[in-house]
Image (cartoon, rainbow, N blue to C red):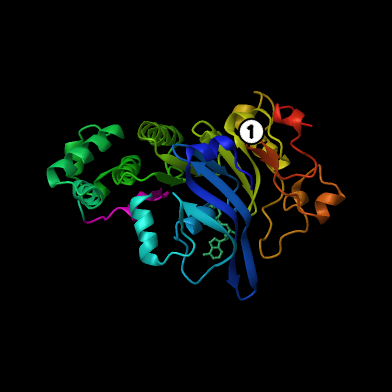
Amino acid sequence: MMTTGIVESRGQALAIHNLSLEFPTFSGAIKALDNVSINVAKAEIVGIVGESGCGKSVTTMAATGLLPKGRYRITGGSVRIFGHSTLAMNESQLQDVRGKMVSTIFQEPMNALNPTIRIGKQLTDVIMRHEEASLTDARRIARDILADMLIGEPERVMKLYPFELSGGMRQRVLIAMAFSCNPGLIIADEPTTALDVTVQAVILRLIQNRARRTGTSVIFISHNVAVVSQLCDRLYVMYAGRIVEQGVTRAILDAPQHPYTQALLRCLPERVAPKQELEAITGAVPNLMHPPAGCYFQPRCKEAVDLCRSRSPQLEGANGRQVACWRRGVGPETEQGSPQ
Ligand SMILES: Nc1ncnc2c1ncn2[C@@H]1O[C@H](COP(=O)(O)OP(=O)(O)OP(=O)(O)O)[C@@H](O)[C@H]1O
């Protein structure tokens, strides 16, 4: 996939190039990723959006070596994290990358925090290990990051065990933990889906704010375009293991090109006039063991023509705006924002 000049000149935090991956099973291979390319520049905030099962998590987990060993097969492509090629790394090299360069924040903080150790010790241990800081310095850094996460009385919270905190507070602690080892890249994989909507918005904004201040790159993974579009510089839209559209967030929101992106946006209450009905996308994501011929979205697409049913469209476009759809060449007019 092509990258923009802007992105390249700022340097890459993550460069996934044409990654294809499958999960072998007794009844056949699940083709989870097909030629996925994602670039994240240093200090850039990028969103990956799409329905459940589209391959958002598999993409970043494959890149960081978090998929179960021996259960998947890379069938093509490459991944570089800050210039380091991760696909050929052994487990200890991957742990090094995950410890020093990338932190992932998942949905359930209880699984990521040790229930038997006080918050303060968990945080200071990480900081002392990564920053080679003294205990006094590590405690000061921990206090600062917790305060940055808008945790009042950080000293008191550091004395508590994870179970003594609410879900929202635990998630803030986990985000503090992710930032505490100063990673260049944070992957936030639906980190707030389990929380209520108002808490979600506040917490996601905390990640964005600290990332902007510290120059950390972030990937927000979400099935909710509305949530990520408020936080991200650019968006990648995934469907059935393929990137179907990518571009600057504003351009995608103002003039979505792919029928799937358009459908995702039509599902958002905030984009629908008061008395208009919300649309749901009919049909389901295809079975990736037996994907349909041609464009994977064609069985659900109202605009599909014969070509869509026989040949896969490639991502095409320029200036960082690309779409994979036979009905939408991103030509000079559409780059300006007018759908064809
Ligand atoms: N360990 C595994 N073994 C077999 N198939 C898997 C495995 N992990 C993921 N998959 C399959 O890969 C595809 C992509 O899954 P993935 O979890 O990346 O989707 P997602 O877009 O992140 O969805 P969600 O939002 O539900 O997490 C799905 O079809 C899923 O069933």
Q: Secondary structure at mark 1?
A: helix
Residue plotted at (42% across, 34% down): 208
- Whether the residue under disc 1 has CB within 8 Å of ligand 1: no
Q: Quadrant of ligand 1?
A: bottom right
- Asked if residue 222 lies left or right of residue 285, the reply is left
Q: Quadrant of residue 114?
A: bottom left
Give the answer, above or below, for where 275 lies relative to 143: above
Give the answer, above or below, for where 78 lies relative to 333: below
- Tell whether position 157 is magenta: no
Q: Residue furthest right?
A: 306
Residue 320 lies, in percent from the top left, at 62, 37
Residue 108 lies, in percent from the top left, at 39, 51
Residue 149 lies, in percent from the top left, at 31, 35
Q: Pointer 1: residues within 10 angstroms few (<14), some, or many (20+)?
A: many
- Tell whether position 113 is magenta: yes
Q: Nearer the viewer, residue 134 or 245?
A: 134
Residue type pointed to by label 1? Ile
Residue 323 lies, in percent from the top left, at 70, 41
Count of numbered tags: 1
Residue plotted at (49% across, 72% down): 70
Give the answer, above or below, for where 267 lies relative to 240: above
Q: Quadrant of residue 316?
A: top right
Residue plotted at (68% across, 34% down): 256
Residue plotted at (45% across, 60% down): 65
Q: Residue furthest bottom?
A: 26
Q: Nearer the viewer, residue 76 or 271?
A: 76
Write down the region rendered in magenta: 102-116
Q: Residue furthest top?
A: 274
Give the answer, above or below, for where 285 lies relative to 12: below
Q: What residue is shown with label 1?
A: 252
Quadrant where the image shows the C terminus: top right
